[in-house]
Image (cartoon, grey):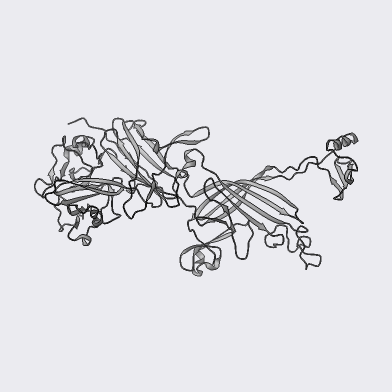
Amino acid sequence: MARVLPCLAFVVLIGLCRPAQAQWITQTNALKSGWNSVFFHVDASHTTIDLILAEDPSSPIEEIWYWQPALPTGQFVESPQLPTGGGTQWSTWTRLAGPNSVLQRLTGNGAYLVKVASKTASYSWRVKGKPVAPTYRWTLTGLNFIGFPTPPAAPPFFEAFLAAAPELQQKGEVYRYQGGELNATNPVRVVAFRTTPVRRDQAYWVRAGDSYNQYFGPIQIIQASAAGIRFGDGQGQAQLRLRNLANVPVTITLRQIASEAPPAGQPSVAGAPPLLLRGAINNTNLTFGYTALASGPQTWQLAAAGQTGSEVEVVLGLNRSQMSGPPGAVFAGALRFTDSLGLSQVDVAVSAEKESTAGLWVGGAAASYVSHYLKPYAKAANAAEFTALLARLQLAEGAGGYHYERDPNTGRVMVFGGADHKSGSYLLDGPIKIDSGTVARPFPLRLIVHNDGSSAKLLQKVYHGVGLASNAVLTTKETLLLPGQLAEARRISSVQFPTSAGNIPWNFTGVMRQGGSLTASVPLAYDDQASNPFLHTYHPDHDNLDASFTTPLPRGLESYGVTRQITLAFTAPQDDFNSLTQGGQDLTGNYTEVMTFEARGSQTRQYNVLGTFTLKRISDIATLTSN
């Protein structure tokens, strides 16, 4: 017996997310006249067998039998079964019955018998489907009808392939179909392990006696969905773990494979997902580096089982900043894993959708900086300094009707007279300080934003519940919710914004995406008793009414108008792994608010509030119902 080759297990822990369209790969099956076995590593259940065969009007395929391995208690398969309708393990399609056949679709990880018309020397049956990761069920009570994920171009021989599983090699029985009628030589037991290739497209009857077999090739995918890695429109990372169970070092190679063109009637594929492989951590700023999978194959050299370095964590990320196109655009491809022994090729589907910012976003800003409004007043300790101060400021006593005096108690210089009739105002010594300063503790501000996919609105409150048509809705009015379901509904409010009778939101301008910005203006009328902070309804000096409490006063006497211009500047991702792969459910950026206070006439004064914000999408309902 040849030297026992190492056994490699590939343990994959894949984070799943919302379903998305997968990519497409064509599996070529070499058939002969008579009965052939086929094992599908792609799933073609998107269409029917009749439509698949209709793609080639000259197809010689007459029957297809699907093996269903779930056996009732107490039954077992002692020898390769004949395709007969009398058993419970077969479902069938025939050309004669066509759409009335029991078997209608071809699923992945399935073993089939295919009958080809007589006098057909050879036929290449090409089936396009979605690649599926290998998943197997093994029974000890009889034969198993299975396939192996070997390389299609240069498949290994059984001797080399099974050397990694010596018990299966020594005790196992393997039977294969080779065309022709069903008889003593079809299927035939494989005896010449040294010269018989393990074909990727062929299914085999295999029995290993009373040993439970876990070997289906040196690369095994455990705890992974057959659908592969689906990032959807929100997931950003998927974690995998590679483990070498061999007694010698091995090398695993990963390549990203582009999707073929989708079949007719299936969504188009915009391109391959821009995948990143997480690198080492930068201890200076605690960020991870990365390598783009599109740059070329990636390899891991793993030590023998049980030794340091026999296991490695692999983290894949999706760089959504490189995904162009409209929301919902499909990006798909495959992750192809091969081993340095040349025994296996495992294709793992990977797909993603261009994210949409449509829906309800709730979060908050942390106001960390507020602009000053500090006046530097002129001071003079004595008469000499007072004279020097006026000279420095280029002011002269009596010029323009102004008179200047020094307050002997404080040293400040006061101004009288002039065109604006000053009556002892302090003299400014330079421009007013209006730059921003830090606050003692960041102040939280709740933000509620709804985006319909093309434009965004800022809300004071929103209702989320069951609508009058018994559908899930986002609405600005409680009356638009189903009365019997109010207990299950939720109201989300922001006390920092003014209320209104119709709960009318404020329109944003700009684009809601990474690197974009949104700006909205929120006015506060000077006579708005409900929301203006300068008004106190029952205080005679701040009720905005005259002495008789009947006539409203003009703006600027007891109350000021306020306009709040709010800008959300979404940060572009930083050039590190986590920033580029943070997903599509969170948006962060810089918060800026310019508050303009409006007094009498055209008199205004501005204050700036600065900070950061985070928004999280809590609903993807794109319609905001208001009537």
Q: Is residue 587 above or below residue 490?
A: above
In the rendered image, residue 201, in percent from the top left (x then y), is placed at: 22, 44
Q: How many marks?
A: 0
Q: Which quarter shows the C terminus?
A: bottom right
Q: Along the horizontal axis of the image, is 474 left or right of 25?
A: right
Residue at the spot 35% in from the left edge and 49% down from the top edge: 22
- Out of 177 and 256, give the one closest to the viewer: 256
Q: Which quarter shows the N terminus?
A: top left
Q: Along the horizontal axis of the image, is 48 left or right of 549?
A: left
Residue at the spot 73% in from the left edge and 42% down from the top edge: 433
Asked if residue 380 shows in the view, the reply is: no
In the rendered image, residue 204, in percent from the top left (x then y), is placed at: 19, 45
Most extreme residue toward the front is 57
Most extreme residue toward the left is 184
Residue 161 in which image quadrant: top left
In the rendered image, residue 494, in percent from the top left (x then y), is placed at: 60, 57
In the rendered image, residue 202, in percent from the top left (x then y), is placed at: 20, 45
Residue at the spot 56% in from the left edge and 46% down from the top edge: 589
Residue at the spot 68% in from the left edge and 43% down from the top edge: 436
Asked if residue 253 shows in the view, the reply is: yes
